Each structure stands twice: as C-alpha cells, then as structure tokens.
Amino acid sequence: MAGTRIGVFASIAIGLLLAVGAGTAGARSTGTTVLRFHDADSTFTGVGFDANDPNAVPTVGNSIVITLRLENLATQFGKPSGTIVGRVLISCSVLSSDPTSQTLDGICNGIAHVPNGFFTFEGNGGFSNAQVNHWAITGGVGPYQNARGQIKVVNFKNGSSNATVMLSS
C-alpha cells in the first residue's frame, strides 16, 4: 500500500510539473502548447495518518501533501533539458477509503510555480495506481489567468514519472 501511495504521489507531482509548464507556454502563444517535465524530486506527507507506515490506510478526512521539483525534459523557459525550473505543491483530500480492498479516492488540487508565474490544476491522480493519470488545468494568475488544458502523467515502476502538459489559451 505504501509503495502504491508513493507511485500515486509521484504521478501527482509529475502532473503538477506539466501543469506549470503548460501555463508558461500558454502565456507566450496562442493555440496549443506542449511542455514536458520529469519528476526530479518529490516528497509526500500524510496528514491524519502515518505515511511512513506501509500498513497505514488513510481514512475519510485524511490528507496527503505532495511537493516536487520540476525538471525540463526538453529546452523550455530558456533553460536546457535536465534543468530544475520550478516546483509543484499538491494537496489531496481522502473522500472515500476502503481498507479491505486498500482503495482510496478523493480530489487533489495543485499549483505549479515556473520561472514566469504559476498555474493551477486538479484531479484524482494522487489516488490512482494507473500507469497513466490525467489532470485538468484550471487557471492561474497573470499570464496564466486563462490557462486551460490537461496534463498527462506516465508513471514508472521505479516511482518516477514524466508529464506532458497540453495547454490551450
């Protein structure tokens, strides 16, 4: 269960990274912009349960907080591939918990900070053990105020993930 939670949280973090890149791209152009990120470093913290206990199953009302660093998978924001370009913060609330099947569901909200601003996203990717998760880009401030689109996060067995942000403005 803990390994699954870590993978889920990593996918959320990747999603945030993609969301941040998409917002920045949308500020520069019209149409659809695609950005790609790697989850360079992520952590998750359980609120109301011990996230370090592999047998702990969060209950309704518990939360998970995920933080991650965004790494370019291509040259973006005037910086080469492999460069850390921002950070993502995600907050997930448990709305449904079934200890018997060890399944969780809920909603996650995130913010991605990039060199020229930030944008927001949401979804339930933090509670899914799927190989691919999708997040909705919901807006931002300043150059990202009209940001819309989606983030596709591909999760790997080693706990890392890559995100592709598709931003429409």
Image (tube, grey):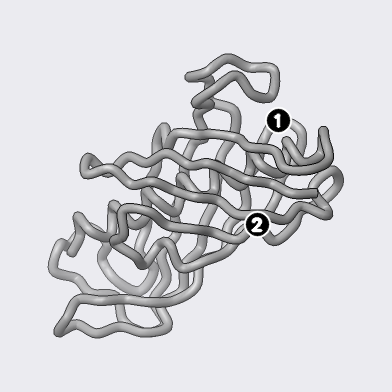
Amino acid carrying mark 1 in the image? Pro
The residue under the point 28% across, 43% down is 156
Report the quarter where the N terminus lies.
bottom left
The image quadrant of residue 20 is top right
Q: Which residue is mark 1?
A: 115
Depicted 78 relative to depicted 87: above or below: above
The residue under the point 44% across, 34% down is 38
The residue under the point 20% across, 60% down is 2
Crowd around label 1: few <14 · some 14–19 · many ≥20 (10 Å): few
Q: Nearer the viewer, residue 148 or 7?
A: 148
Q: In the current view of this chain or complex, which residue is farthest to the front?
A: 31
Amino acid carrying mark 2 in the image? Ile
Q: Are marks 2 and 1 in contact (CB under 8 Å)?
A: no
Depicted 143 relative to depicted 28: above or below: below
The image quadrant of residue 94 is bottom left
What is the x, y in percent for residue 162? 42, 39
Q: In the current view of this chain or complex, which residue is farthest to the top?
A: 80
Q: Nearer the viewer, residue 64 or 14?
A: 14
